[in-house]
Image: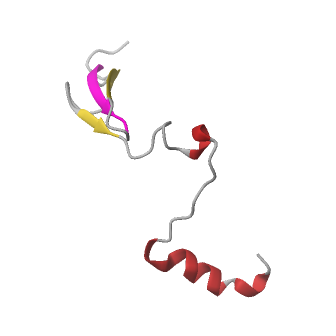
Amino acid sequence: MKKDIHPGYHFIDVKMTDGTVFRTRSTWGKVGEQMSLEIDPLVHPAWTGGSAKLMDTGGRVSKFKNKYAGLGF
């Protein structure tokens, strides 16, 4: 194996959406940095069993629905 070509494997803190923090090892960032998650197993529908919601940012979903309303979707 070649030397000095692999990223550093170090400890970081991961902040979940509910504010809890846990420590893990990663190649992300620098030693001691904190990664803040926007989506994690506590809120994602794939793990919570909830249904997915469409976020209408800037009216894009509404614009799409209006444009293709006659196609029978």
Q: Residue at x 68, y 83 (%)?
A: 68
Residue closest to the far top: 1
Residue 5, position as x, y percentages in the image: 30, 23
Name the residue nearer the viewer: 16 or 69. 16
> Residue 70 sits in which quadrant?
bottom right
- All told, the count of numbered labels is 0
| 10 in the magenta segment | yes
Q: Which residues are magenta?
A: 8-16
Name the residue nearer the viewer: 9 or 59. 59
Name the residue nearer the viewer: 29 or 47. 47
Please identify the quadrant where the C terminus is shown.
bottom right
Specify the color scheme: secondary structure
Residue 10, position as x, y percentages in the image: 27, 20
Please identify the quadrant where the N terminus is shown.
top left
Q: From where the camera sits, is residue 8 visible?
A: no
Q: Residue at x 57, y 59 (%)?
A: 53
Q: Is residue 36 above or below residue 68?
A: above
Q: Main secondary structure of the magenta part?
A: strand
Q: Is residue 38 above or below residue 27?
A: below
| 56 in the magenta segment | no
Residue 46, position as x, y percentages in the image: 61, 42
> Residue 3 sits in which quadrant?
top left
Left/right placement of residue 21 relative to residue 31 reads right
Left/right placement of residue 63 relative to residue 14 reads right
Residue 12, position as x, y percentages in the image: 27, 26
Q: Residue at x 60, y 79 (%)?
A: 64
Q: From where the camera sits, is residue 4 visible?
A: yes
Residue closest to the far right: 72
